Each structure stands twice: as C-alpha cells, then as structure tokens.
Amino acid sequence: MLKKLYATDQTRLFFILKGGIVGLVSGIVVSIFRLAIEKMTAYIQELYLFFQEEPLWLIVWAILSVLTAIFVGYLIKAQPHISGSGIPQIEGLLQEEIHYRWFQVFWRKFVGGILSIGSGLFLGREGPSIQLGASIGQGASSFYHSPKYEQKILISSGASAGLAAAFNAPIAAVLFVVEEIHHTFSPLMWLTSLVSAIIANFVSLYVFGLRPVLYLGHMHSLPLKYYSLLLILGVFLGILGRLYQKNLLDLPRWFNKLPMPSPFYGVVPFLLVIPIGFYFPQLLGGGNQIILKLEESGYSLYLLLLLFLLRYIFSMISYGSNLPGGIFLPILSLGAILGALFGVFAMEYLGLEGYYLKNFIIIAMAGYFTAIGKAPLTAIILVTEMVGSINHLMPLGFVSLIAYIVVDLLGGHPIYESLLDRLVSYKKVANNSEQIIIEFPVTAESILDGMSVRDFIWPKETLLVTIKRDQQDILPHGDTILQMNDRLLILTDTNHANAVRKELRKKTLIK
C-alpha cells in the first residue's frame, strides 16, 4: 500500500515539474506576444492621429494593410489551424479529431496573431495565447516522448498557462480548461494545469505589474433591492448572447460569397478598419481600453447603442475572416457596453444611483460571456480576477445563471463546441480510421452511477476496456457496477469518436 502511494505521489511530482516548465515557457512566450500587440496597437493609434493631419498617407497605409493581410493569408494557407481563436482546434486535438505539428502552428500563430490583433482589428489576444500555450505543451510532450494521456495533460496545462498569462487570471484559466475544454474533472490534469497557470501568471505579473487587467477602482456593493433589475439584465443578455452565437456561426455562409480564397478573407477587415481608425482611433483593438473608460466617459444611450453596433458588426467581420484572433475580449467588451447601456437606462428612467454604473458594467461582462460560451464558472471567476474585486460574486453568479438558463431554453450550445463541430464537419473523412481510446466520466447526474455494465446499451463501434476508480484500474465484466467518479476508457475509432461522445452524453444524462 505504501509502495503504491509513493508511486502515485512521485507521478504527481513529475507532472508538477513538467507543468511548471510548460508554464514558465508559456508565460514568457505569451508575455512577449501580449507586449508586442499592445505596443503595435498603441503605435498604430498614433499613426492614425498623424493620418488625420496628412490624409494622403492613407493610400500608402491601405496598400500596406492589403499586403499584410495577404502575408497573413499565406500563413493561414500553409497551416489552416492557425485561423480563428485556436480554442476549437485545441479541443479537436485533445479529442483526436484534429492533428497538426505543434511548431508549424506555433510560429505562424505567433506572427499572424501579432499582425492581425496589433493592427487594431476587433480581435482578442486570449484565444491565440491559449493555442500558443497548448502548442508549447504539445512540444514538451514530444520532447519527453510522453504517452498519449500525458500529452493531453501537458497540452491542457499549456492552454491554462496561455490564458493565465493573457489575462492575469490563473484560477479562471484552470476552470476554463475543466469547464470548456474537457467538460470533466481529472485531478492530475487539474493539478498540472494549476501549476502551469500560476507560474505563467507570475511571469506575466513580472512583465506587466500587479494591477488587474480591467481594474475599475472602488465599487459599491449592489443592494438587494436592485436584484429585480439583474433578473431583467440576465434575460436581456441571454437573448443577445444567443443572437451572437447564431450570427457567428452564420459567418462562413456570408464570407463564402466573396470572390477570393478563404485564407485571404482578411483583406476585408484590414481595409474596413482604416475608416474606423481614421475617425475613432481610440476604439481600435480588442476592447479592454473601452471597458476601462466606459464609466468615466459619460456616454448617452444613443452613443452606447452606436458603439455596441459598431463593435458587434466589426468584431463579426474581424473574426469571420479567419484571421488569427480570439473572441474572449471582444465578447467582454460587448458585455461591458451592454451593461453600461442598461445601467444608463436605469439611471435615467428607474432612479438608479450613478455610482452603481460600474457594477452593471462588470456584471454584464460575466453574463454575456456565460450566454455565449455557456461556461458560467469560468465567466464569474474570470471577470472577478480581471477587475480585482471579490465583492460582486453574488450578482455575477445571479446574472450568469439567468443568462445561462435563457440561452439554454433558446437552444444555444457552447460556442467553442459548435465551432469545433463546424470545423470537423469540413474535414474529409479518411478511408482508413485508427483505433483510439476515449475517456468518459461517470458524473453525479449520470444514469450509469449504480448500474451494471451489462444493463447499459452501449453505442455501436465501442468497447469498454478499463474502468479507472481512484488509483485502481478495473477490468470490466457484465456484472461490474459503475460508480460516480469512475472514468471509463472506451475503445472506438477516429471516425466515430465524436459521435460516440455525443451519444454517451445524451444517453447517460438523467432525464
């Protein structure tokens, strides 16, 4: 018994060390990536101020912008998996539905992300940062010649480190990996991801300082009498979140009408951002500066509505063009604008005190993110860490829950899961499939808890080969009773893996 316990502790120690190395490298890389984007965005904003005085230079700038878009397009053409945020690709990689060489993705995502996001397009740095971290984890697993399960843990820890360094939000980064990428809890994966996130965050704090990314200063606690407004806000955000999901998933249908190859769709936003930058240079980028200035700017309802429409439409154009860039920060900025819009309306017509406007900005960020990503725990902790205040957990949780329920009733699915389904559906199905092992958890709400193996109708093309229970591996037979927290290792093939996972989720959920 002691020998087995020692072996288990030694295994965890090795994963802690490997996760620490992945976190350190990811923290350094993502901090450089983040710093380059911030410096480039600031420089381009100053450049547009110069163009306001010398508008003829816009012709030269337009030509440079087209050439930049074409260059990024060639990067995408050489490696299509650098397009978009990269999070669906990571999920596909972990589910063995997508395969790519880590370094080919890594350097192209780094260069393409800086050029696309730093040019002022309405894209976020977090998705590319997550994919950069995951690529480093994948590279580390190749260096260690890791078995498949260890490779997945290191990829997950790298993804966690990438998000932590991008937003200085290590706890939310771990929750994101658990809630959004894996949809299940694994102690070893969680521990390794936490180590990576903490170390990557430490590196980022050393570079950017201790101030939270979206620090809004002191805020008053929202009284209970305003929770009826939060109920309305949650419904409002849920409806608009579902609309965002539909519009985002419809983008390929619109972009496919353009008379150009898909890797070069980026020419469109690179040209359209020029008039935005010329007239409103302060609006360029992912949106964090807008969030910081919303409360003090004194926008009217009319201006807030125009600001929301501008950022909504152009963020869709930016992301739909397949350029390397994420939607985390654009979603948070849109949520903040909606919160300000709702708060100003409540101030003008419902008697809300002005100093509570910050509260609605913060709360709406979490609610809108929840409605689109359907990851409420990640949304709540992410916003909490980014603003540096834990005094709003109750209203954040309340609005996020309402928004989640509304979008669920409207038929919404997690946006990254939907993007992965679309990505996989575009792939050509190979004639020869490979056998793989997928892992499926027995959760508290599963009908498998307490059921014998023979009493469950297993999907076709599957074979239950092992049950992992605590630190034991159990070879199943017909009379084996399944228990909550069991992890089932199921043999299938690459062509059926995704369908098997979906069928198991559907059949095992308590109705």
Image (spheres, rainbow, N blue to C red):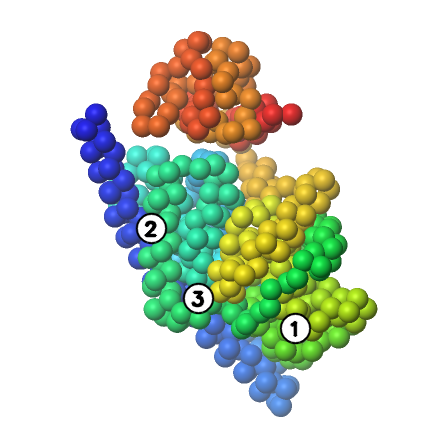
- Position of 182 relative to 467 (above/below): below
- Nearest to the eye among marks 3 and 1: give it: 1
The residue lying furthest to the bottom in this view is 53
Task: Report which quarter residue 208 is drawn in.
Answer: bottom left
Q: In the image, which disc is placed on residue 34?
A: 3
- Nearest to the eye among marks 2 and 3: give it: 2
- Nearest to the eye among marks 1 and 2: give it: 1
The 10 Å Cα crowd at callout 2, few under 14, some 14 to 19, many 20 or more, is: many
Task: Pinpoint residue 421: horizontal percent, then vertical percent.
Answer: 58, 39
Q: Is residue 400 visible?
A: yes
Would you name the residue on which mark 2 appears? 195
Q: Residue at x 71, y 71 (%)?
A: 353
Task: Report which quarter residue 482 is drawn in.
Answer: top left
Residue kind at label 3, given as amino acid type: Arg
Sooner in the amino-acid sequence: mark 2 or mark 3: 3
Looking at the rendered structure, the secondary structure element under dot 2 is helix
Number of marks present in the image shown: 3
Kindly report the distance in space between the C-alpha atoms of the residues bearing marks 1 and 2.
38 Å
Q: Residue at x 65, y 52 (%)?
A: 399
Out of 142 and 76, give the one closest to the viewer. Answer: 142
Q: Is residue 345 visible?
A: no
Looking at the rendered structure, the secondary structure element under dot 3 is helix
Out of 394 and 410, give the one closest to the viewer. Answer: 394
The residue lying furthest to the right in this view is 349
Looking at the rendered structure, the secondary structure element under dot 1 is helix
Sooner in the amino-acid sequence: mark 1 or mark 2: 2
